[in-house]
Amino acid sequence: MKFQNLMASTGEWLRGEGPHHQVVVSSRVRLARNLRNRAFPGWAKKAERTMILELIKPRVEELPEMQEPFSELLQDLSALEKQVLVERHLISREHAAKSVGSAIIMNRKQTLSVMVNEEDHLRMQSIRSGLQLRQAFKLVDKVDSALEGKLDFAYDAKLGYLTACPTNVGTGMRASAMLHLPGLVLSELINQVIQAVNKIGLAVRGLYGEGTEAMGNLFQISNQTTLGEKEDEIISRLNKVIETIIEKEQDARQVLIQKKPNTLWDQIGRAYGLLTYAHAMTSKEALNLLSVVKLGIDLGAFPEDKRLAIDQLFIETQPAHLQKSTQQKLNAEERDHFRAQIIRERLKSFPKPDISKVAREPEPTGNSEPEKNE
Amino acid sequence: MLCDVCKCNDAAVFLTQIVDGKMQKVNLCEGCSKEKGVQDPTGFALADLLLGIGAAEEIEKGGSSTRCPVCGFTQADFKKTGRLGCSSCYVAFAEGLNSLLKAMHKGTAHVGKLPTRAQKTLALSDRMKTLTENLRKAVQEENYERSNSWRVN
């Protein structure tokens, strides 16, 4: 598969059809694996890295899950193309900085991506829309089991899978969900939630992982520990916490509707106004405004069939996607102008917010039980 | 120049340290430098930054001259980068790593997925354990007829 084809089709997870999709944008599970007694990518010399790559890449390409894959060496991708993959969460920012001796292989549906020689020899990731951590794990676990028959993975009876960084040793698994929490942000409850989640040993991060800012009211929540707990237990723990957060977010939205309706309609109206009429917009502003319109769709102020257009704009207004689609390098000012233009065009037939259609629920109690299943 | 930790914001705090005669540079943005509590650059190690404050000290316990026999990585390299050289480093630096892992994770032993290869080894070692135990019991009960049947000739 060519890069152009990849650009043209959005991944399955971007279509936002998964369970709890109003709050959970996507679920991701990645496994880190290494070859026994081979220097980890950060320590291996170029020749050894290349040798390891040549050993792993064909094994991954021949997997039944990888029919007609997108498979590229990192040195063959331009900086812009790498950035597009980062914006789609198909490779990490660390991997985008790699060149000779590293590769990316992913399936056509963009639900499975394998990074070769990132921080570890293998980083296998499955990404799904909505809350589907268990399904994401199932796929990546299957791929791992298929590969372990062909490659000698570094595994220790006591420490489990051995990784370059001791923070990943054991299961080598990082499960994470991207949550859209405008209700908790608008009602200024988000910091409480983040602190509570941190206390129970889970990490909360911004849009692009470690150290990144939370833009567009998007937050990533993931497990921090990988040793001493089964994969299944880690996922259960995460699911439980995420379900509680979903509940808190829904409660916060209802409280806003009932107690601060003017603030809420003002935010939605302003977001709509700016997105449909502005002529310059930074990616941060666009994300924040799109987030409010997405909230408007969730609440019923905009028709449901407009959801896909907004979800796509979340990705397509990102700097690299924007430049890739114009086929030319733009400076920041030109980008902001072009971004506003794209948004205006896409929202041409977007109806005005209609608050009479907002679904009002009875006063939330705030202490209902979290759901048991995904 | 971008921050070495978040790789997102511009670096505002530039640290340079000489460790074992080698220069080590770290660039941090304002947020990360505050978050990591890096106001006093003396005795600063990247391992602290990546693995948590106090990690470098734990690593030191194993002696910074210890070298991995497989890949040549040293404790000092680990302290500097917060990453290991190869899978054998876990054996070479086990001493310093143990307390580090204890502080970092929920437990000190893996309880998750077993690769098929390891399952076979585990099954063999379990069988070995059962047989040894049976042999010991039989000898204890002076049931030599049975114990002889388990003895490896």
Image (cartoon, rainbow, N blue to C red):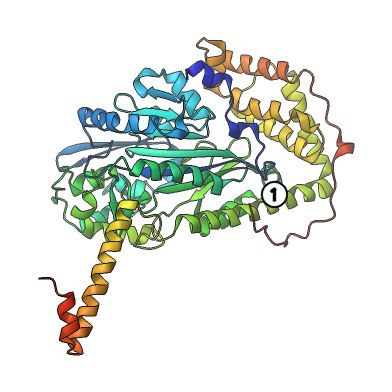
**Position above or below: B149 against A43:** below
Snapshot quadrant of residue A48: top left
For this orientation, the residue located farthest to the right is A356
Image-based side of A239 in relation to A163, left or right:
right
What percent of the width, then of the height, locates residue B83?
Answer: 29, 44
Question: At 54% across and 37% down in the image, what residue appears?
Answer: A207
User: Callout 1: 10 Å neighbours few (<14), some, many (20+)?
Assistant: many
Give x and y (percent) for residue A106: 46, 30
Helix, strand or loop at label 1? It is helix
- Can I make out residue B11 in this image? no
Quick check: A366 left or right of A75? right
Which amino acid, by three-letter code, is at mark 1?
Glu
Which chain is indicated by disc 1?
A
> Height in image: A163 above or below A42?
below
Name the side, left or right, on which B16 lies relative to B5: left
Q: Is residue A314 visible?
A: yes
In the depicted view, which residue is nearer to us: A26 or B102? A26
Per the image, the residue denoted by label 1 is A249
Whole-percent x, y for residue A201 in the image: 48, 57
